[in-house]
Amino acid sequence: MNFHILTLFPDMVMNGLMTSITGRAVQQNKIGIEAVNIRDYTEDRHQRVDDYPYGGGAGMLMQAQPVYDACKSVLERLPEGRKRRVIYVTPQGEPFTQQKAKEFSESEELLLLCGHYEGIDERVLEEVVTDYISIGDYVLTGGELAAMVIVDAVARLVPGVLHNDISAETESFHGYLLEYPQYSRPESWHGKEVPPVLLSGNKREIETWRKKQAKERTRERRPDLYEKYCALEESKAFLMKQKLLHMDMIECINRGQAEVLYRSERELLLRERCSGVLYHAGAPENPDEWEAGQILLKEKQNGKLCLVLHGEQMVTCVEELLSLRVSLTCCQAVCTRREKLPVRGLYRQDTFTTVLGYQIRSLGEADGDAVLAEYEGNMPKAYVRECIRKGSMKGAFLDGQLCGYIGMHEEGAIGLLYVHPDHRRRKLAQALETVMINEGLERGEIPYTQISADNQAAILLQEKLGLCRAKINLYWME
């Protein structure tokens, strides 16, 4: 991922960002950071980039021409097809949140435009800017500090930037909870002791304590977040009545990726914030007065809609109201175990080498062409390539040749499983899925997969792995 900061003070930006974690990530080629001096693109012989605003008023305004040319110089040298966004940091923008940082981390090229004086000529903003972002309700002397905040928050979510990627998921704001209090040596300091539970070595008790502390801290310091957390917990209680059927929605909440759009005693509508997929569970008492349906109509007006129905009872209603059609009927299989699946006879835990000599490893961007050459699924190839880029796919290799692969979808389901015909009946699919399940269990997740209802081979594989299958189908509608 690359950051391009358009500024009048490039040294200020680079001196701040080329240290600590972001600086190390640049040195390791995990991310790229450059500062583009807007002043280099002015046509004024005195290097001026500002002028008086039409209509009068205090202060000066940055002119359109140098800003536009600086932005254009960056965009023109970016490879075609790269995901790009141009962010203008301004107090008038949308509030910057952890969720927004996660959204920006899905891009490949981020341009951050730093204003000064009274701002920038509106005409150039209309031409180049895709996002207006504010880091708070206050005014700074320029946009550089705000841009640095955004770069730091986004960069740490890029795979490989943090040594421990799990820490990016378990800290403040994950699932609307603030982070729990933390302690280091010595055990006693200024008469204050480290809580005994943290010295016990009992991981389950430690996690229980941390969850309780996070809830109490959020309730005291951020009641607005705590209210959202409680809404999610109540939603999860509703879903747990049919746990296997609703595991995709439950895990969406557990992983801090859920947004409640509608909730009543009889139904629930969630948005999965990474993929934008909407999930619906339950049914209204009177379909003719379907309040969640009105929300879905508004969502459809905002763009392409992808909806997952849990059960067949609402399919006809959705077809008539939203003109959506079923694109996939599938069943959900869930790993209900807490301990890892046995790997004996499949592969060695330390190296992911199977008994027949296959090497299982994470796929990188260099493997993309090999995967897509074999890909036979119904997802767009650009989506598959993006999954590889995010590091959410694994491949099986024999003598350097790709023989099979598996991945995790944006919304959290294990899928994209494929084994080349020449390598089938060798437990390779079982080994690949076992690796994915066990890594999910290590992260504290409940692994699950969704299989086409008529794919008997895949259904048998889930049974062999010991996964439990929901009796009611899911319906993907688009």
Image (tube, rainbow, N blue to C red):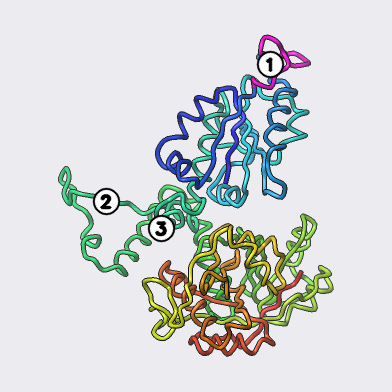
| Residue underneath mark 1 | 50
Q: Main secondary structure of the magenta part?
A: loop
Q: Residue at x 42, y 79 (%)?
A: 347
Q: Nearer the viewer, residue 85 or 361?
A: 361
Foreground label between 1 and 3: 1
Q: Which residues are magenta?
A: 39-58
Residue 231 appears in which quarter of the rendering? bottom right
Q: Is residue 446 visible?
A: no
Q: Crowding at label 2, few (<14), some or many (≥20) Cα neighbours within 10 Å?
A: few
Q: Give the Cα separation between the discs numbered 3 and 2.
A: 18 Å
Q: Give the Cα separation between the discs numbered 2 and 1.
A: 50 Å
- Please state which amino acid type lies under the numbered disc 2: Tyr
| Residue underneath mark 3 | 215
Q: Is residue 86 visible?
A: yes
| Residue underneath mark 2 | 183
Count up the numbered dots.
3
Across and down, in percent, residue 57 comes to 71, 14
